[in-house]
Amino acid sequence: MAKRERVVRMSVEQPLWRALTAYRLLTMVYAILLAVFGRARYDRPWVAIAFLVVMAAWTLGTLPKVAGAVACTKRFLGADLAIALVGILLTPLADFEAQHVDGPTLPSIWTAGSVLAFAIKGGWRWAALASTFVAVANIIERGEPSRDTFHNVLLVWVASIAIGYVVEVARASERTLARALEIEAATRERERLARDIHDSVLQVLAMVQRRGTALGGEAAELGRMAGEQEVALRTLVSSGLVPTTRVSEDAAEGAVVRSVEVDDREDGPSGPADCDLRALLAPHAGSRVSFAEPGAPVLLAPAAAKELAAAVSAALDNVRVHAGQDAQAWILVEDWPDEVIVTVRDDGPGIPEGRLAQAEGEGRMGVALSIRGRLRDLGGTAELISVPGQGTEVELKVPKVSRGKAGSGR
């Protein structure tokens, strides 16, 4: 299918950047007005004028820098804070009396804008660092700080940390909401596909199963196969036949939910695209194999996904060979932030102690090569747990960024 993309952008952070832009402009004007109306008190007015000119030029020239997280770099934040600190420390030089009467500093409340930029960009830790520098500068500027000085310093420190913490919570909420939208989009598409297929193919397969069972003989076998294909198709519809929906992080736009339909080709303009592991494992589902998955795409590099699917196939082959054709098997897929875990479990008789070592000694390397060898090449692990009389469980773990030759696609 041709590539189509539907994008939903969410950002509670962007309004904060716009508010910071307005705050910097307003406090710049406020600092200039304070200097104009209080010009009579300056011992060296040229110091105040020189600083305010630099502050105004810097504020106006760097407006694009506080328009969003991408433009607001660490270098800019450092320079912005440095200007605020210089303004505080220059205040006694321009206005000697300010040290003794708790008068305003040259940048006045414009300084808080620098601290707020740290808070929005990096959270409460960055805010604490910036406000600490401002606090030290204010204490040095006052010489013998009063209770009001400590009160103002503490107020800026607490307020900036609180804002930084709120920003971090907002970002976490954005990601949670984006994940919820991702799951909702995938669920709706699965339901739509299920309705369409239920009205056609699934009804035919169900009818063939019923009629074949009623007729008996070779028709019964055909009915059994139709029943297995019905189960497999239902599972495929519920997992692998939905457009890819993913969440990405855009520093300028916040959390971004992208619902994408792409060509079936493995390679895109920028190399191999991530593969949904569910689509490779869903065909295993049938009357004797149950398949459980997260409900959202489980993305791996194509080579890693294929190798992991092959290891699952090898585990199911072992179930059929050693546990019998009537054994039930279960496949469980778990998608964690740093790894994918696939568990294959059966209700067979289990593996006697020492049997695997004996098989390897006899040259039968199914588990060693087909399962453990594949996972080792992916940088993952394969653990086999078996209790005689209680079945066997194979747990396959693959890191999201695979190592080795099979994982070189990322």
Image (tube, grey):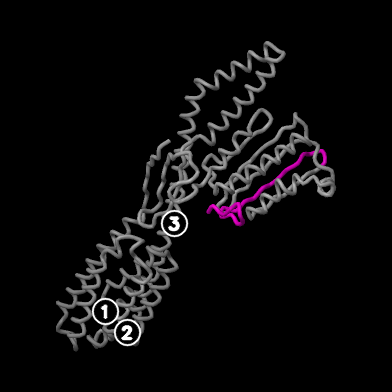
User: Mark 3 or mark 2: which comes first in sequence?
Assistant: 2
Question: Residue visible at 53% across and 42% down?
Answer: 276
Tell me the SS state at disc 2.
helix
Which image quadrant is residue 6 in?
top left
Distance Cα–Cα, label 1 vs label 2: 9 Å
User: Mark 1 or mark 2: which comes first in sequence?
Assistant: 1
View extreme (top): residue: 215
Q: Which residue is mark 1?
A: 105
Distance Cα–Cα, label 3 vs label 2: 35 Å
Tell me the SS state at disc 3.
helix
CB atoms at circles 1 and 2 under 8 Å apart? Answer: yes
- Residue 263 spot, x, y in % from top left: 45, 39
User: What amino acid is labelled 3 in the image?
Assistant: Val
Along the line of sight, the residue nearer the viewer: 144 or 210: 210
Question: Residue visible at 74% across and 32% down?
Answer: 327
The N terminus: image quadrant: top left
User: What amino acid is labelled 1 in the image?
Assistant: Thr
Q: Which residues are magenta?
A: 388-410
Relative placement, left or right, of 308 versus 29 is right
| Mark 2 nearby-residue class (10 Å; few <14, some 14–19, many ≥20) | many
- Residue 185 spot, x, y in % from top left: 44, 38
Q: Which residue is mark 2?
A: 141
Instruction: Say if residue 184 shows up in the picture.
Output: no
Q: Which residue is mark 3?
A: 169
Question: Residue visible at 24% across and 70% down?
Answer: 59
User: Mark 1 or mark 3: which comes first in sequence?
Assistant: 1
Relative placement, left or right, of 402 versus 89 is right
Instruction: Say if residue 212 shows up in the picture.
Output: yes
Which mark is drawn over residue 56?
A: none
* Residue 157 higher or lower than 17, as above or below: below
